Each structure stands twice: as structure tokens, then as C-alpha cells.
Image (tube, rainbow, N blue to C red):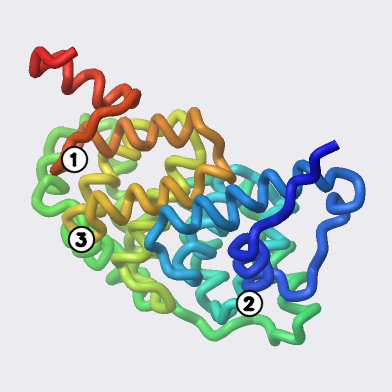
Amino acid sequence: MKQIHITENAVKHHEELFPNHESKLQKTDPEFIALFDNWAFDEVIRQSQLDTKTRVMMILASTIASQALGEYKVMVGAALNVGLTPVVIKEILYQSVPYVGVAKVFDFLHATNAVFREQGIELPLESQSTTTAETRFDKGVAAQKAIFGEAIDKMRQQAPSDQLHIQDFLAANCFGDYYTRNGIDLKTRELLTFAMLISLGGCEPQVKGHVTGNLKIGNDRARLIDVVTQLLPYIGYPRTLNALGMIDEVVSPTNIRGGDSVFSKKMALKSGVS
């Protein structure tokens, strides 16, 4: 039987995250480990321009949204190994609450605290809040406008009167309570939100909105595709292709190459090329 060997690049990138760690599956499913590691820790990483810390941040956000608690706990250890601070890890977790829902985040909070205690990290961490009950709404609106521009005013004006409180919650809670916190900058927070939404699935309108927000705040098409590429091993092809579809709807590629992609075929048909 032909044996599949793990590439040097895959070993190097795996060691970076998990020094001296060998999966139990290496003994029971060595062929699968070789196939997966060569792809996820070599091919995928070579295709993405994300630095290691950003890559791990996006994976943490994705595993929370996917409710992959086991993988999340492993990645918290990896995050500490590559130099992400406990504050950054907790801020990713807090950022997920308005998007994933607190009922789904509680187990991840307890799991994070358990890992931190094992690592001798003292809890609670230093507060990162920058708002008060009096300022959270105005600062939240300011954060919304920094990302989405004046469209926020139009969205509030068009909201039915019996739904305006949801717009107030979005401003004061989602953005005022979370986006304004220290520990992670606004540009990275918006990229984390994109990672969470594409991992949740069924959020295509919100994904499209946050593609626009990311572009406005400085995360360009290439960076968004890098995030999607890196998360592919964790979220699978259907959600990956949906995410790419939303990116294509908002911002078209500057160069269109031939191939079998749906987008390429659509453009070929429009131009009369077969």
C-alpha cells in the first residue's frame, strides 16, 4: 500500500501552532492526517497572504461560529503559542456574542477560562471597555459610520417604528458595547465579523453587508479572499463558495481568468465567450 508522506511545509506550519504535538489520529488514521495536513497546513497556507497571528484569529472566530468547541480549545492553545495575548483571545470571544448569541458562547467562555487557568493566566483580565451607559449609543453609531458610512442614517430612517429598537440595540450593544473595546482595532474586528458570518451559514445578506464594510475600512477583496481561503478547511466548500459569491456581488475581480468557476462562466456568457 502506498504511503502518503507529510510535506516539510506542513510539518513546519503544524509545529508553529502545536509544538511537539502529535494527534491521536496519527496512530488510527495516518492516511487522513497526511492528506489533511498537506492541504490545510501547506497548500492552503501557501495560497493565503495572512500572517500567522491573523490566520489564527480568524480560525478562532470561525470555530466559535461553527460551534466547534473541541477544535476551539486546541486553537486557543495554538493562539498562545504564536503570541496572541489573552486579551486578544477574549476580545475575539466577546466580539462573537452579538453575532453567534450568548447561549452558544457560554461554553466557549468556560473553555477559554479553563485553558487560561491551566496556563497560569490570572483572571479576570484587565477591562477593555471604553464606553459608559451614557456614551455607548453615540460611540456605537460612530463606529457603525466608520465602517458603513452614512448608509447607517438611511437604515435608521427606513426602519419601521416597531423595529427601531433593534436599530438602537445594534448601535448601542453590537457596536457600542463591543466594537469600541480596546484590545483589537476596528479594522480587525470587522474582519473577524466577516469570518464569523461566513462560518455561521445562512447569513448571506449580512455577509454581503460586511463585505462592503470591510472594503470601506481597508480590508480589500484580496484580503477577504485570503480569509475565505484560510477558513475553507474549517467550514467546507459550500459555505466557502457562498462567501466568494457574496464578495463577487460586491466587488468584481480586476482580472478575470479562464477556468471552471461559476463566476468565470457567467462573465464568459455575458461577453459572448464560450
- Number of marks: 3
Above or below residue 59? Residue 266 is: above
Circle 1 is placed at which residue position?
A: 253
Identify the secondary structure beneath mark 1: loop
Along the line of sight, which residue is nearer the eye, 1 or 94? 1
**Residue 217 numbered mark, or none:** 3
Alpha-carbon distance for marks 2 and 1? 36 Å
Alpha-carbon distance for marks 2 and 3? 28 Å
Identify the secondary structure beneath mark 2: helix
Alpha-carbon distance for marks 1 and 3? 19 Å
Question: Which quadrant would the C terminus be assigned to in this image?
Answer: top left
Circle 2 is placed at which residue position?
A: 80
Along the line of sight, which residue is nearer the eye, 136 or 236? 236
| Residue 251 visible, this angle | no
Q: Residues within 10 Å of mark 3 (few under 14, many from 20)?
A: some
What residue is shown at x 53% (from left), y 64% (from top)?
56
Identify the secondary structure beneath mark 3: helix
